[in-house]
Structure formats: structure tokens, C-alpha cells
Amino acid sequence: MSLKSYIITRIILAIPMILILLIMIFFILRIIPGDPVLAILGGKAPVEVIEAKRHELGLDKPIIIQFFDYLGDVLRGDLGVSTLTNRPVWSEIKDRFPATLELTIFSFILALIIGIFWGAEAAWRKDKPLDISARVYSIFIYAVPVFWLGLMLQLLFGIYLRWLPVGGRLSPRVSLDIKTGLFLLDSLFSWNWEAFWDVLKHLLLPGITLGLVISSIFLRMVRNNTVLMLSKDFVKAAKARGLKPKVILYGHAVRNAFVPIFTIMGMQFALLLAGAVLTETTFSWPGVGSYLVLKIKYRDFPAIQGTIIFFAIFVVLISIIIDIVNALVDPRVRY
Amino acid sequence: MRKKFISERLGELISDLFGTGTGWLTFIGAMILIFYIILAIFSPQIAPYDPTERVGRSLTAPNEEFIFGTDNLGRDVLSRVIYGARIALLIAFIAVAIAAGVGVPLGLISGFVGGPLDRILTLVMDAIYSFPGLILAIAIAAVLGPGVINIAVSIAVVYTPTYFRVIRNQVASVKNELYVEAAKALGAKNSEILMKYIFPNVLPSIVVVLSMNLADAIMIEAGLSFLGLGIAPPTPDWGFDLSNGQRFVLSKAWWGLLFPGIAIITVVLGFSMFSEGLNELINPTIRERR
Amino acid sequence: MIFEAKDLKIYYKTKRGFVKAVDNINLTVEKGQTVGLVGESGCGKSTFGQGILRILPPSTFYGGSMKIENQEILGLPENSMRKIRGKKIGMIFQDPMTSLNPVMKIEKLFFETLKTHEPEITEEEARDRTAKVLEKVGIEPERMREYSFQFSGGMRQRVMIALTLVLNPILVIADEPTTSLDVIVQAQIMSLLNELRKEYDMSMILITHDLGVVAEMADKICVMYAGHIVEEALSEDLYYNPKHPYTKLLIKSIPNTNINDLDLKYIPGSPPDLLKPPIGCRFAPRCPYKKEICETNEPPVVKVDNTNVKCWLYSGVEQ
């Protein structure tokens, strides 16, 4: 199958998945909570006002029509209006998304670095202290709730040592021109070193927290796959050609060990998002995750629904992208 | 590919570290579980104070009177940690029971009947499955509101597809075994075949998945209550106490954060060690490993 | 003399003790010579081949002496050893399907290998030399931009050979280079290997379980059994006038082209456990000519005609 037809098939396969998710979200968040009008106006509003609002929101129509209205809205990118702020949910999410993106990308890269280097060196020194410490580390990381890890880092580096801020993205006294919303890039491209340093300091604790949590999965995968690859003939052949250990380890073994890792990245991503919600809340990080938690506190159902839809579509999109990247990385898929 | 349970991953790592077939790890796991179950059942007898009453000065550091210190309302942290085991275990057990209670029958029927019903159910379950578990639970908990059953349901929805998938796939493969064919040929009723031949076959997997599911359920429960979606205060709950403790992080009240966290970690480790041992014991063949 | 092994021992460390995979082996390779090393699987021949390059697991024990161009390589530190691997001693592996990295382009494999041993080499030069050597093994140089899995088995083995030759080593160890290939391809690869060996003026140690294969190519053949070399002779002598009972049985078990001779011979019994090899002759338990002494004392190596044979049957000749 050519790469192009592979991509097209993959996208077509995602459509029923998105549709089912949308149906589920519609029923869970629109039907179960009861009357959204009462939720907006409160129980004591006059009947006429309630009826008018109901008509305005299209809630007097049959449920199936309501569903298609909703579907049409979602497809047009209209996620409704927040009852709390009266702003379109989509634009609120759009404002907060870069923060989540910055946090998740930073964590992901950190996790990859930890996973690859520790995993590779552990595989090279199988059953030696470095390898055993990797396993102990992974056990600890799996058993620890992400927010608790965040709290402990906060306590240690933020409160006791006072090295790093405990929350937020930017100190109030620091000014920054926002273009992409990714503060690290924004400060870097405007050569604003003060802001860059400040942004980085804010990013470190939440980034490390989330990064550590997903690093153990990479660590174990890289380590085990590399051990496997190191026993392969091509590694022996590379050794027989006199290649240096670093080249054999990283150029041959880890490189091959990475191929199956791409296939599981999709699932890591789901974990990353869930972890982001908790991490953002722990560090008052103004991203989509803490937005969701905030909106739940105020029972702002259009916003909750919009955010969940956003997450659903995002997850599906990422899984498509990962599958495509996977086809690109492993040349065997391409030919 | 299946998402793995925390228990499974931990189990793999623990047996990586200590080698497989370590009965004593299972034993330690079981001991931890029994310890927490006793704490949960006998919390009124064990806890030194009433967990919801002010018994000392606010934010007292651990001392002889309050070995885990007190929280911002002067409540004893130790007593709250002990009582917290109740909510954590209760919700985890109910959630797992609901998930299995829904997922297993659906999986049995879907795998056995096949056809369009199977396809639709599989598609729906896959959709739920692909969604980040915690976020799904957050959405449902947000709708249902606080309460033991509501939280348990929110968690159960996340794991129902796991039971469904495991059971459905096994049923689909057992269905065509010779002895099932033979029973059919002898005129056995469908319900009879399902209960007599197929269910006993999938029972071991159900037990293993159940045991592995508990640690995840506890983790999600802690996450939900940390986000303020758990049981209504002042009921002691580890996750909620952590989010409450975070408000006083600036006054360096570490004890309010450390002890509930350790409770969560040890319970999760205990469940994992136990379920890994159980897994090895019951199902040496269904393990997909290395 | 290009290569010399003296009383070479290679023992694997296992939980139950040392596996004496290679035990007191003596072997010399002259310039331009092809030495065949023949034996059943598990006799230690591959261990010997990889042991020369010292690419066995780090816990492996080496004893005795091994020299390449009169340089002792057993005590050599890993850094210096690496400069010998590939550069002075090349190795061709059994399975070309698995011994080429599947996610690297062919040219990358060559470049990386050349760069390791000749750090000043430019990419251009490397590509030139890759093209040349690929041409020699019968592969269009343009195909260096492809991945190994795009080649057939025989073509991959050609790539593997080219990858070994590109550094122009003085000794090549070919470990069952054709076993995993089709019969016709086997013959092609063997003759290619033979031609190139002459052209590049290399010496070769050809490891195989198939006596028929080495008889044509090798100048000298060593027969290995359970970690020992039991017979060493010039190819013709060995083939037409085998001395050791094991060699005799081995030659009889070569499938004959004569259709009437359908009666395939095989050697009864199985090779000994190298964790605890027999005290006397290691072949004694399977030997049809076994004497009492064979089970109690290790036989000496004796010279009969031009053949070195490790067997009690001939020890009387000298006495």
C-alpha cells in the first residue's frame, strides 16, 4: 500500500470513531444532566423566560434534530457559548491550548530523553546498577499519582529550596509579546532573555512532573527492546566491523528498538493528556486541562462539553498522526 | 493493542527486578491489602480521633499527640488517612464490580452472537477505550455529581471496555472449539452453552483483570477527588485531602501531603504485587510478555 | 603466517559452570590460504570464529594465544581490538537476512564502517569505494541507496561480502556463509567468495558443517568435534584418505549423487555436553572403533602421512 492510500484509509477509519465519541458525549453531557436551561437560569426564573431561552437554544426541538444541530455545530467548529463568561468555548480553548501544548511537548521531549538515554545505557549494562536503578525508578513512577509527585516537587523546589516558582506560566512583572502562545518560543524569537528564563523556570516543575510520569514507559520499552536488539545478528555484525560501542548502541540497537515504540506512542499520548489535566491543576497552569476543571466547578456545561469534544477529536487526530509518522519511520511499512 | 493496567506494568517491573515466581512478593502484596482492608473495616476502632472533628490546633506538625500532624481545620491527619482507606477501597471495589458486571455479559453476548450487534458493540467499546480514561471519568463525574456510587460509575465506564474486549475475544475463539461444536450438535441451548462451556473458560481471565483493575480504580478515584470531583467533604478521602493540603503548601505543611500520598502509593503497590502473583498463579498461559 | 591460534580455549560462563566450547585448539593460516573448519552444529566452530574477533559475550573466558600477523590479540585492550575488527579480520555471517540492519540504507552501513577505521575519509570517497566494491560483488552501485530488506537473500549476502571487503582485511572469517541460501545461489556465492579472495589476496577461514562445500575451496581442512580439532589435513588428503573415525563417518554421510546409493549414513548418538565433556576422547561414546584407552585418556595429536589426527588408533604408528 502506498503511503498516500495508507493515510487516506487511516483517516476514513477514524470517522466512525469520532462520530461515536460525539454521540456519546452528546448523550452523557446533554441528556443526563437534566435541563440545561434551568442550569443556566436557575429554578426560579419565570416560565416565559425559560421557554424563550429553550427556544433560543433549540431545546424545544425533537432530540434527534437537536443532535444533528449539535453535530453540525461541532463540524463547523462551533462548540457553543460558555454560560459563565458568555464567550465562545472554542475561542476560550484556543487561548488556553498553547499552554497545554507547551507543557505536553516539553514533558514529552524530557520523557523521551530520559527514556532513550537511560534505557539504552541500562540495556548496555544489563543487570548492573544502572539497569536495576532504572527498574526501581519505573516502579516508583508507576505507583505514584502524578499530582502527588507534582506536590512533592513543589514542596521541595518551590517552597523549601525556593529555586522555582510553584505555579503559573509567567511572573506578573515580566512582559512578553505573545504571538504563538508558546511562551518559550515567543520569548526566544523576540530575544527576550529575561522572559525566556522566567518562562523556563515556570515550565520546569510541571514539565518535569509530567515528563517523569511518562518517562518510565519509554524507559522500559527502550531498555527491553534494546536488550533484544543487542542480541541480534546485525549488532554482532556491526561489532565484527569494529564499530564503536556508542555507534553500535545508539546507531544500530536503539534505532531499531525505536520502531515498535512509535506504535505505542498513541496510548502514551492519552496518558499524557490525562496527566496534563492533573498537572495543570496542581501547578495552576492555564491550559485546557485546568480550564476543564475550572468549568466543572462552575457547572458550565457548554464549556465542559466543548472541552471534552476538543479532547476527543484531538486524541483521534494524534493517533492518526502517530500512525502516519510510524509509517514514515519504519521503512518496511513504506515499501 | 491493549492499554495496560498500572498493576500489570508494575507487576512486570517488579518481576523484572526480582525474577518471576516470587511467591513472597505476592505474599507481601496480600499483606498490604489485608492491612488496608482491616484499616477500612475497623477505622473507628483504629483511628485515634474522629477524622471530621477539630481535635487540635490547625496545621500542627507531627508530634507525639498527632503523629501525622493536623490539617488546616485541626483534624488529625492519621485518622483521616485511616478513614480514607474506606472510601478508596469502597469506591474501587464497587467500580470494578460495575465494570465487570456490565463488560463481562456484554462481551459474552457480543462474542457469542457475533454479527451486526457484535460490530456495533465493538465499535462503541473501542471508542470509549480510545479516550483518555481520566478525562472520560471527569466528564461523567461532572455530570453525575458527588457520591460513592456516582464516582464508582464514572470509573466503571472507563474500564467496562477492557472487560468487554478481553471476554469478547476469548469467547470468539472458544466458540469454535470442538467441544462447543459438539455440544451444539447435541442440541444444547445457547444459554446452556454460554454458561456451561464458555463462561468457565473465561472465568480465570475475569478474575485476573478484576484484580489488576483495582489499582487503576484507586488511582483514578484519587485523581477525581484531587480535582474536587470526589466525595463531598468532610468525608476523609486521600485525593481530596491532598488538594486541601496543597492550599497550605506555602506554610510548609508537608505532613498533609506526604502521608495521604504514601497511602495511595502503598495501596497501589500492594494491589499490583498481589494481582501479579494471582496472574501467574491462575493464568500462566494468557500472559503476553516479552 | 597470517593467523595462529595456540592452545586456544574459549569457555562460556553459565550458571551451571563453564561450557568448554573451544578447548586447546591449534590452528595456523598462511597468507592466501583458505582453511576449512568443519563440524556439526554445536561443536564450537562458530564460537571459534567469533572468538577470533572477541565479539562473544563479555563474560566469556579466553585462554592460550591468538596472533594476527604475529601480534598477540588475546590480551589486547578493547580499544585496540576494535581497530583489528573489520580492518584486519573481517567476518561474513551466516544469515544475511538478519545481519544487516534493516532500518539503515546500504550506503550508510558502508560509510559508517569506513569512517570508523579511516576517520579522515570524505563522504564522496566512501561512496566511490562503496560503488567499486559493490560492482565487484555484482550489485549495481545505484542500489546503495536502498535498504537491505529490498534485496533478495543472495544479494544481501553479496552486500555483506562487499561490506567485509571494503576495508580490505587480511583475513576473512566466513561463518556458514551460504547455509541460509538456495542451492544455486549457494554455488554462486561460494565461487564469488573464492574469486574475490584471490583478487584481494586475503586468507580465509571458512566455517561450515558441509564437508562437500569446503573440499572444493579450502587448501586445508580442520575437522572439529566437541571443542577439539580432531583432524587437520590438506583437502584432498582429508577427502580421499580420512584418518579419524569421525571424519570417515562425516564423509560417508555426505549425500552421494549416485542414485543407487540411497542408503544415507548418519552418525549414531549425539555430541557430548560441553559442560562436562568425556574425560578421554570426546568422540569415544559414538566411535565404532573405540578401545579401552579412548574412554580414559585424552588422545594425543599424531602425524600420520601429512595428516594431524587426534586419535588413539594411530598413536601406535609413531611408537
Image (cartoon, rainbow, N blue to C red):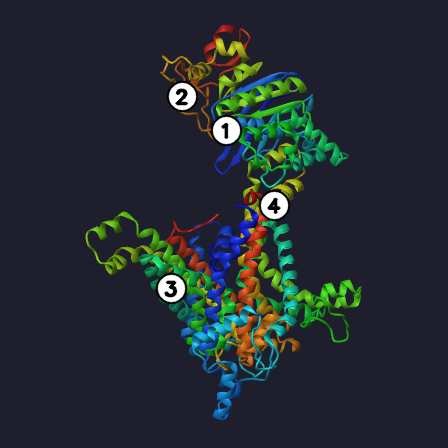
Residue marked by disc 1:
C180
Q: Chain of mark 3?
A: B
Instruction: Name the residue carrying label 2.
Output: C285
Q: Is residue B238 left or right of residue B38?
A: right
Mark 4 chain: A
Q: Amino acid at mark 1?
A: Ser
Residue B206's place in the image compared with C118, above or below, is below
Residue assigned mark 4: A254
Q: CA distance from mark 3 to mark 1?
A: 49 Å
Q: Which residue is mark 3?
A: B103
Protein chain holding label 2: C
Cα separation, mark 2 vs mark 3, equals: 62 Å
Query: In front: C231, or C292?
Result: C231
Left or right: C316 in relation to C50: left
Residue at x 38%, y 69% (from the top left corner): B98
- Percent from the top left, x then y, of residue B271? 45, 62
Q: Nearer the viewer, mark 2 or mark 4?
A: 4
